[in-house]
Amino acid sequence: MSRADVAAAVAAITGDAAAGAADEPVGAAPRSEAQFAALLRTTAEHGWRVAVGGNASWRRDRPAADLHLTTSRLDAVHAADAGDLVATVGAGLRWADLQHTLGAQGAWVALDPPGTERTVGSVVATGTAGALHTGYGAVRDHLLGLTLVTGDGRILAVGGRVVKNVAGFDLTRLACGSWGAFGVITSVTLRLRARPTAECTGRVEGSWHDVEEQALRLLDAGLMPHALELRREAGEAAWTLRVRALGTETGVDAARGTLAEVSPDLAFATADGSADQWHTTGPADDAVVLRVGALPTQCGAVVEHLDAAAPGGRVAVHPAAGWIRWEGHADADTVRRLRESAAALGVPLTVERAPAAVLDALGHTGALPSGTGPLVDGIRALFDPSGVLAAPLEVG
Protein backbone atom coordinates (compact mmCIF):
# COMPACT_ATOMS: atom_id res chain seq x y z
CA MET A 1 0.00 0.00 0.00
CA SER A 2 1.27 3.46 -0.85
CA ARG A 3 -0.05 6.97 -0.59
CA ALA A 4 -0.39 6.95 -4.37
CA ASP A 5 -2.75 3.95 -4.14
CA VAL A 6 -5.00 5.75 -1.66
CA ALA A 7 -4.92 8.94 -3.73
CA ALA A 8 -5.84 7.02 -6.86
CA ALA A 9 -8.82 5.41 -5.10
CA VAL A 10 -10.02 8.83 -3.92
CA ALA A 11 -9.75 10.29 -7.41
CA ALA A 12 -11.57 7.34 -9.00
CA ILE A 13 -14.51 7.53 -6.55
CA THR A 14 -14.90 11.26 -5.94
CA GLY A 15 -13.40 12.71 -9.11
CA ASP A 16 -11.23 14.99 -6.97
CA ALA A 17 -7.50 15.08 -6.57
CA ALA A 18 -6.47 13.91 -3.11
CA ALA A 19 -5.61 16.71 -0.70
CA GLY A 20 -2.55 16.98 1.51
CA ALA A 21 1.21 17.12 1.11
CA ALA A 22 3.17 14.11 -0.07
CA ASP A 23 4.26 13.23 3.46
CA GLU A 24 0.74 13.55 4.94
CA PRO A 25 -2.29 11.24 4.92
CA VAL A 26 -4.57 11.57 1.92
CA GLY A 27 -7.48 13.95 2.51
CA ALA A 28 -10.88 13.75 0.83
CA ALA A 29 -14.31 15.40 1.08
CA PRO A 30 -16.91 13.05 -0.47
CA ARG A 31 -20.04 14.69 -1.85
CA SER A 32 -22.53 11.94 -0.99
CA GLU A 33 -23.26 8.94 1.20
CA ALA A 34 -22.62 6.75 -1.83
CA GLN A 35 -19.09 8.14 -2.18
CA PHE A 36 -18.45 7.59 1.54
CA ALA A 37 -19.68 4.01 1.17
CA ALA A 38 -17.49 3.35 -1.87
CA LEU A 39 -14.40 4.76 -0.17
CA LEU A 40 -15.00 2.75 3.00
CA ARG A 41 -15.54 -0.46 1.01
CA THR A 42 -12.22 0.17 -0.70
CA THR A 43 -10.38 0.90 2.54
CA ALA A 44 -11.85 -2.24 4.11
CA GLU A 45 -10.67 -4.35 1.18
CA HIS A 46 -7.12 -3.00 1.44
CA GLY A 47 -6.91 -2.59 5.21
CA TRP A 48 -6.33 1.17 5.05
CA ARG A 49 -6.91 3.12 8.22
CA VAL A 50 -9.51 5.94 8.05
CA ALA A 51 -10.10 8.99 10.28
CA VAL A 52 -13.27 11.04 9.92
CA GLY A 53 -14.07 14.60 10.98
CA GLY A 54 -16.26 17.62 10.28
CA ASN A 55 -14.58 20.97 9.72
CA ALA A 56 -11.85 20.48 12.36
CA SER A 57 -13.19 23.10 14.77
CA TRP A 58 -13.76 20.84 17.81
CA ARG A 59 -10.96 18.35 17.30
CA ARG A 60 -8.31 20.02 15.19
CA ASP A 61 -5.92 17.10 14.84
CA ARG A 62 -6.80 13.54 13.87
CA PRO A 63 -5.39 10.13 14.72
CA ALA A 64 -2.83 8.39 12.55
CA ALA A 65 -4.53 7.11 9.39
CA ASP A 66 -3.98 6.52 5.69
CA LEU A 67 -7.08 8.48 4.69
CA HIS A 68 -8.68 11.52 6.33
CA LEU A 69 -12.32 12.02 5.36
CA THR A 70 -14.41 15.10 6.09
CA THR A 71 -18.19 15.46 6.01
CA SER A 72 -17.92 19.18 5.17
CA ARG A 73 -19.64 18.77 1.79
CA LEU A 74 -22.65 17.02 3.33
CA ASP A 75 -24.10 20.35 4.42
CA ALA A 76 -27.59 20.31 2.89
CA VAL A 77 -30.87 20.83 4.71
CA HIS A 78 -32.81 17.88 3.29
CA ALA A 79 -36.08 18.70 5.06
CA ALA A 80 -37.11 21.18 7.72
CA ASP A 81 -40.76 21.12 8.74
CA ALA A 82 -41.54 23.48 11.57
CA GLY A 83 -45.13 22.23 11.57
CA ASP A 84 -44.12 18.62 12.24
CA LEU A 85 -41.17 19.76 14.39
CA VAL A 86 -38.71 17.58 12.47
CA ALA A 87 -35.63 18.39 10.38
CA THR A 88 -33.24 16.14 8.43
CA VAL A 89 -29.85 17.65 7.60
CA GLY A 90 -26.42 16.62 6.39
CA ALA A 91 -23.82 15.90 9.05
CA GLY A 92 -21.48 18.52 7.62
CA LEU A 93 -23.91 21.41 8.16
CA ARG A 94 -22.61 23.95 10.65
CA TRP A 95 -24.67 24.04 13.84
CA ALA A 96 -25.00 27.82 13.63
CA ASP A 97 -26.29 27.59 10.04
CA LEU A 98 -28.83 24.95 11.11
CA GLN A 99 -30.20 27.20 13.84
CA HIS A 100 -30.31 30.19 11.50
CA THR A 101 -32.28 28.23 8.90
CA LEU A 102 -34.72 26.92 11.49
CA GLY A 103 -35.07 30.33 13.10
CA ALA A 104 -36.55 31.70 9.88
CA GLN A 105 -39.41 29.23 10.41
CA GLY A 106 -39.81 30.02 14.10
CA ALA A 107 -38.19 26.73 15.18
CA TRP A 108 -34.93 25.58 16.73
CA VAL A 109 -33.08 22.60 18.15
CA ALA A 110 -32.96 23.22 21.91
CA LEU A 111 -29.25 22.50 22.25
CA ASP A 112 -26.35 24.89 22.77
CA PRO A 113 -23.13 22.88 22.27
CA PRO A 114 -19.89 24.79 22.94
CA GLY A 115 -17.86 25.92 19.94
CA THR A 116 -18.60 28.37 17.15
CA GLU A 117 -17.94 26.31 14.00
CA ARG A 118 -19.23 22.90 15.06
CA THR A 119 -20.95 20.66 12.52
CA VAL A 120 -24.10 18.72 13.29
CA GLY A 121 -22.20 15.44 12.90
CA SER A 122 -19.53 16.59 15.36
CA VAL A 123 -22.12 17.45 18.00
CA VAL A 124 -23.85 14.07 17.61
CA ALA A 125 -20.67 11.98 17.34
CA THR A 126 -19.21 13.47 20.53
CA GLY A 127 -22.53 13.84 22.38
CA THR A 128 -21.62 17.39 23.37
CA ALA A 129 -24.45 19.33 24.99
CA GLY A 130 -24.38 22.72 26.67
CA ALA A 131 -26.22 24.38 29.54
CA LEU A 132 -29.64 23.84 27.93
CA HIS A 133 -29.24 20.16 28.80
CA THR A 134 -30.87 21.08 32.12
CA GLY A 135 -34.20 21.99 30.58
CA TYR A 136 -34.22 20.08 27.31
CA GLY A 137 -32.09 16.97 27.73
CA ALA A 138 -28.93 15.47 26.26
CA VAL A 139 -28.06 15.31 22.55
CA ARG A 140 -29.55 11.83 22.22
CA ASP A 141 -32.91 13.17 23.44
CA HIS A 142 -33.11 15.36 20.32
CA LEU A 143 -32.29 12.57 17.85
CA LEU A 144 -35.05 10.86 15.92
CA GLY A 145 -32.84 9.07 13.42
CA LEU A 146 -29.64 9.16 11.43
CA THR A 147 -27.82 7.61 8.51
CA LEU A 148 -24.64 5.70 9.26
CA VAL A 149 -22.09 4.44 6.72
CA THR A 150 -20.36 1.47 8.32
CA GLY A 151 -16.68 0.66 8.14
CA ASP A 152 -17.29 -1.86 5.37
CA GLY A 153 -19.41 0.54 3.31
CA ARG A 154 -23.02 -0.32 4.20
CA ILE A 155 -25.49 2.56 4.38
CA LEU A 156 -27.81 2.15 7.37
CA ALA A 157 -30.80 4.44 7.90
CA VAL A 158 -32.05 4.08 11.47
CA GLY A 159 -34.80 5.78 13.42
CA GLY A 160 -37.52 7.81 11.76
CA ARG A 161 -38.77 11.26 10.78
CA VAL A 162 -41.75 11.42 13.11
CA VAL A 163 -41.63 12.05 16.83
CA LYS A 164 -43.60 8.92 17.74
CA ASN A 165 -41.49 6.56 15.62
CA VAL A 166 -38.94 4.72 17.80
CA ALA A 167 -37.81 2.11 15.27
CA GLY A 168 -34.03 1.77 15.37
CA PHE A 169 -33.88 3.94 18.50
CA ASP A 170 -31.16 1.91 20.18
CA LEU A 171 -28.78 2.17 17.22
CA THR A 172 -29.42 5.90 17.01
CA ARG A 173 -28.40 6.26 20.65
CA LEU A 174 -25.44 3.94 20.15
CA ALA A 175 -24.01 6.19 17.46
CA CYS A 176 -24.49 9.33 19.59
CA GLY A 177 -21.30 9.90 21.56
CA SER A 178 -19.44 7.05 19.84
CA TRP A 179 -16.84 9.32 18.19
CA GLY A 180 -17.48 7.50 14.90
CA ALA A 181 -16.45 4.10 16.23
CA PHE A 182 -19.36 2.35 14.50
CA GLY A 183 -19.46 4.29 11.25
CA VAL A 184 -19.63 7.71 9.64
CA ILE A 185 -22.71 9.76 10.52
CA THR A 186 -23.76 11.33 7.22
CA SER A 187 -27.21 12.74 8.00
CA VAL A 188 -29.27 13.37 11.12
CA THR A 189 -32.98 13.74 11.83
CA LEU A 190 -33.64 16.05 14.75
CA ARG A 191 -36.57 16.92 16.97
CA LEU A 192 -37.49 20.62 16.77
CA ARG A 193 -39.29 22.96 19.14
CA ALA A 194 -41.01 26.30 18.71
CA ARG A 195 -38.42 29.03 19.10
CA PRO A 196 -38.81 31.02 22.37
CA THR A 197 -39.90 34.62 21.95
CA ALA A 198 -38.49 35.83 25.27
CA GLU A 199 -35.82 34.93 27.80
CA CYS A 200 -34.02 36.17 30.86
CA THR A 201 -30.82 35.31 32.70
CA GLY A 202 -30.16 35.84 36.37
CA ARG A 203 -26.65 35.68 37.79
CA VAL A 204 -24.79 36.10 41.04
CA GLU A 205 -21.10 35.79 41.89
CA GLY A 206 -19.40 34.48 45.02
CA SER A 207 -17.45 31.61 46.52
CA TRP A 208 -18.26 28.01 45.65
CA HIS A 209 -20.11 27.62 48.93
CA ASP A 210 -22.25 30.72 48.25
CA VAL A 211 -23.30 29.85 44.71
CA GLU A 212 -23.78 26.15 45.47
CA GLU A 213 -26.09 27.03 48.36
CA GLN A 214 -28.20 29.26 46.11
CA ALA A 215 -28.34 26.66 43.34
CA LEU A 216 -29.48 23.94 45.73
CA ARG A 217 -32.04 26.34 47.20
CA LEU A 218 -33.55 26.82 43.73
CA LEU A 219 -33.63 23.08 43.10
CA ASP A 220 -35.04 22.30 46.54
CA ALA A 221 -37.85 24.76 45.80
CA GLY A 222 -38.79 22.62 42.81
CA LEU A 223 -37.66 25.20 40.26
CA MET A 224 -36.15 23.90 37.03
CA PRO A 225 -34.82 26.72 34.82
CA HIS A 226 -34.00 25.85 31.22
CA ALA A 227 -30.35 26.29 32.17
CA LEU A 228 -28.68 26.35 35.57
CA GLU A 229 -24.91 26.54 35.69
CA LEU A 230 -22.16 27.27 38.21
CA ARG A 231 -19.08 28.44 36.31
CA ARG A 232 -15.50 29.28 37.21
CA GLU A 233 -13.14 30.58 34.55
CA ALA A 234 -9.62 29.18 34.18
CA GLY A 235 -7.19 30.44 36.79
CA GLU A 236 -9.85 32.31 38.79
CA ALA A 237 -11.25 31.70 42.27
CA ALA A 238 -14.70 33.31 42.03
CA TRP A 239 -17.74 31.37 40.86
CA THR A 240 -20.82 32.58 38.99
CA LEU A 241 -24.29 31.07 39.25
CA ARG A 242 -26.38 31.61 36.11
CA VAL A 243 -29.99 30.59 35.54
CA ARG A 244 -31.90 30.99 32.28
CA ALA A 245 -35.61 30.93 31.52
CA LEU A 246 -37.06 30.87 27.99
CA GLY A 247 -40.57 30.97 26.55
CA THR A 248 -43.22 33.64 26.04
CA GLU A 249 -43.07 37.12 27.55
CA THR A 250 -45.70 36.17 30.12
CA GLY A 251 -44.01 32.91 31.03
CA VAL A 252 -40.56 34.46 31.34
CA ASP A 253 -41.85 37.31 33.49
CA ALA A 254 -43.45 34.78 35.84
CA ALA A 255 -40.26 32.70 35.96
CA ARG A 256 -38.16 35.78 36.74
CA GLY A 257 -40.40 36.67 39.64
CA THR A 258 -40.31 33.15 41.07
CA LEU A 259 -36.53 32.88 40.74
CA ALA A 260 -36.01 36.27 42.38
CA GLU A 261 -38.30 35.31 45.24
CA VAL A 262 -36.27 32.20 46.05
CA SER A 263 -32.88 33.77 45.31
CA PRO A 264 -33.09 37.57 45.82
CA ASP A 265 -29.40 38.10 44.98
CA LEU A 266 -29.89 37.18 41.31
CA ALA A 267 -29.32 40.12 38.95
CA PHE A 268 -31.27 39.79 35.69
CA ALA A 269 -30.13 40.80 32.22
CA THR A 270 -32.26 42.04 29.35
CA ALA A 271 -33.27 39.58 26.63
CA ASP A 272 -30.33 40.48 24.36
CA GLY A 273 -27.88 40.44 27.24
CA SER A 274 -29.27 37.10 28.36
CA ALA A 275 -28.44 35.31 25.11
CA ASP A 276 -24.94 36.80 24.96
CA GLN A 277 -24.05 35.42 28.39
CA TRP A 278 -24.54 31.82 27.25
CA HIS A 279 -22.35 31.87 24.17
CA THR A 280 -19.44 29.47 24.74
CA THR A 281 -16.44 29.42 22.44
CA GLY A 282 -14.53 26.26 21.63
CA PRO A 283 -11.47 25.16 23.62
CA ALA A 284 -7.87 25.91 22.77
CA ASP A 285 -6.18 23.64 20.23
CA ASP A 286 -4.28 21.67 22.87
CA ALA A 287 -7.00 21.63 25.55
CA VAL A 288 -8.66 18.59 27.08
CA VAL A 289 -12.40 18.69 27.76
CA LEU A 290 -13.90 16.25 30.27
CA ARG A 291 -17.49 15.54 31.24
CA VAL A 292 -18.08 14.04 34.67
CA GLY A 293 -21.42 12.75 35.93
CA ALA A 294 -22.48 13.86 39.40
CA LEU A 295 -25.57 14.13 41.57
CA PRO A 296 -26.31 17.64 42.91
CA THR A 297 -24.94 16.70 46.34
CA GLN A 298 -21.75 15.25 44.79
CA CYS A 299 -20.74 18.29 42.74
CA GLY A 300 -18.61 19.90 45.44
CA ALA A 301 -16.60 16.72 46.02
CA VAL A 302 -16.08 16.21 42.27
CA VAL A 303 -14.87 19.79 41.83
CA GLU A 304 -12.37 19.26 44.68
CA HIS A 305 -11.01 16.13 42.98
CA LEU A 306 -10.70 17.94 39.65
CA ASP A 307 -8.85 20.83 41.27
CA ALA A 308 -6.53 18.48 43.16
CA ALA A 309 -5.50 16.49 40.08
CA ALA A 310 -5.58 19.31 37.49
CA PRO A 311 -5.73 22.78 39.09
CA GLY A 312 -6.56 25.92 37.18
CA GLY A 313 -9.09 24.56 34.69
CA ARG A 314 -12.34 26.12 33.55
CA VAL A 315 -15.23 24.36 35.30
CA ALA A 316 -18.94 24.44 34.49
CA VAL A 317 -21.24 22.60 36.92
CA HIS A 318 -24.78 21.62 35.90
CA PRO A 319 -26.24 20.08 39.06
CA ALA A 320 -29.81 19.67 37.81
CA ALA A 321 -28.61 17.88 34.67
CA GLY A 322 -26.14 15.76 36.64
CA TRP A 323 -22.82 16.59 35.01
CA ILE A 324 -19.73 18.79 35.18
CA ARG A 325 -17.55 19.98 32.29
CA TRP A 326 -13.84 20.61 32.93
CA GLU A 327 -11.59 22.26 30.35
CA GLY A 328 -7.86 22.74 30.64
CA HIS A 329 -4.44 21.35 29.86
CA ALA A 330 -3.71 17.77 30.89
CA ASP A 331 -1.65 14.86 29.67
CA ALA A 332 -2.84 11.26 29.51
CA ASP A 333 -1.50 10.41 32.98
CA THR A 334 -3.45 13.32 34.49
CA VAL A 335 -6.65 12.18 32.79
CA ARG A 336 -6.06 8.66 34.12
CA ARG A 337 -5.71 10.04 37.65
CA LEU A 338 -8.93 11.97 37.18
CA ARG A 339 -10.63 8.78 36.00
CA GLU A 340 -9.43 6.98 39.10
CA SER A 341 -10.67 9.72 41.43
CA ALA A 342 -14.02 9.81 39.61
CA ALA A 343 -14.31 6.04 39.90
CA ALA A 344 -13.60 6.29 43.64
CA LEU A 345 -16.57 8.64 43.90
CA GLY A 346 -18.69 6.31 41.79
CA VAL A 347 -19.18 8.81 38.94
CA PRO A 348 -18.47 8.39 35.19
CA LEU A 349 -15.89 10.49 33.34
CA THR A 350 -15.96 10.98 29.57
CA VAL A 351 -13.36 12.69 27.39
CA GLU A 352 -15.31 15.06 25.14
CA ARG A 353 -12.24 16.39 23.41
CA ALA A 354 -8.47 15.93 23.57
CA PRO A 355 -5.44 16.16 21.29
CA ALA A 356 -4.86 13.01 19.25
CA ALA A 357 -1.77 12.05 21.27
CA VAL A 358 -3.75 12.10 24.52
CA LEU A 359 -6.65 10.10 23.06
CA ASP A 360 -4.27 7.55 21.55
CA ALA A 361 -2.59 7.07 24.92
CA LEU A 362 -5.92 6.75 26.74
CA GLY A 363 -7.42 4.29 24.26
CA HIS A 364 -11.03 5.26 24.83
CA THR A 365 -13.11 8.31 25.71
CA GLY A 366 -15.43 6.85 28.32
CA ALA A 367 -15.26 5.53 31.85
CA LEU A 368 -15.79 1.97 30.69
CA PRO A 369 -15.97 -0.57 33.51
CA SER A 370 -13.77 -3.63 33.76
CA GLY A 371 -14.83 -6.42 31.40
CA THR A 372 -16.47 -4.09 28.89
CA GLY A 373 -13.78 -4.58 26.25
CA PRO A 374 -15.09 -7.81 24.66
CA LEU A 375 -18.63 -6.39 24.45
CA VAL A 376 -17.49 -3.14 22.80
CA ASP A 377 -15.16 -5.03 20.45
CA GLY A 378 -18.01 -7.33 19.47
CA ILE A 379 -20.30 -4.41 18.65
CA ARG A 380 -17.57 -2.70 16.65
CA ALA A 381 -16.95 -5.89 14.67
CA LEU A 382 -20.57 -5.81 13.48
CA PHE A 383 -20.17 -2.35 12.00
CA ASP A 384 -16.47 -2.24 11.16
CA PRO A 385 -15.36 -5.87 10.64
CA SER A 386 -12.01 -4.90 9.10
CA GLY A 387 -11.24 -2.38 11.84
CA VAL A 388 -10.52 0.50 9.46
CA LEU A 389 -12.14 3.32 11.46
CA ALA A 390 -9.69 5.17 13.69
CA ALA A 391 -11.78 6.15 16.73
CA PRO A 392 -10.85 6.51 20.43
CA LEU A 393 -12.72 3.44 21.61
CA GLU A 394 -9.95 0.87 21.80
CA VAL A 395 -10.74 -1.12 24.95
CA GLY A 396 -10.09 -4.71 23.92
Image (tube, rainbow, N blue to C red):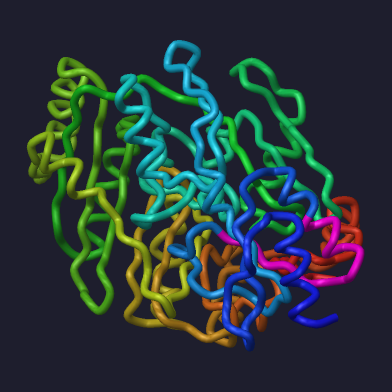
Residue 225 vertical placement versus 184 (above, below) = above
Q: Is residue 347 visible?
A: no
Quadrant of the image occupied by residue 19: bottom right
Residue 6, horizontal then vertical, whole percent: 76, 72
State yes or no: residue 13 in magenta.
no
Residue 99 vertical placement versus 230 (above, below) = above
Please identify the quadrant where the C terminus is shown.
bottom right
Which residue appears at 44% of the width and 74% of the height?
306
Q: Is residue 80 visible?
A: yes
Quadrant of the image occupied by residue 47: bottom right
Image mark count: 0
Residue 110 vertical placement versus 32 (above, below) = above
Which residue appears at 72% of the width and 45% of the height?
174
Answer with left or right where residue 168 lies relative to residue 77: right
Please identify the quadrant where the N terminus is shown.
bottom right
Residue 234, horizontal then vertical, whole percent: 28, 74
Residue 299 vertical placement versus 24 (above, below) = above
Answer with left or right where residue 223 lies relative to residue 68: left
Q: Nearer the viewer, residue 70 or 58?
A: 70
Which residue sits furthest top? Answer: 83
Answer with left or right where residue 225 lies relative to residue 36: left
Residue 161, horizontal then vertical, whole percent: 62, 21
Which residue appears at 67% of the width and 56% of the height?
15
State yes or no: residue 42 in magenta.
yes
Q: Which residues are magenta?
A: 39-53
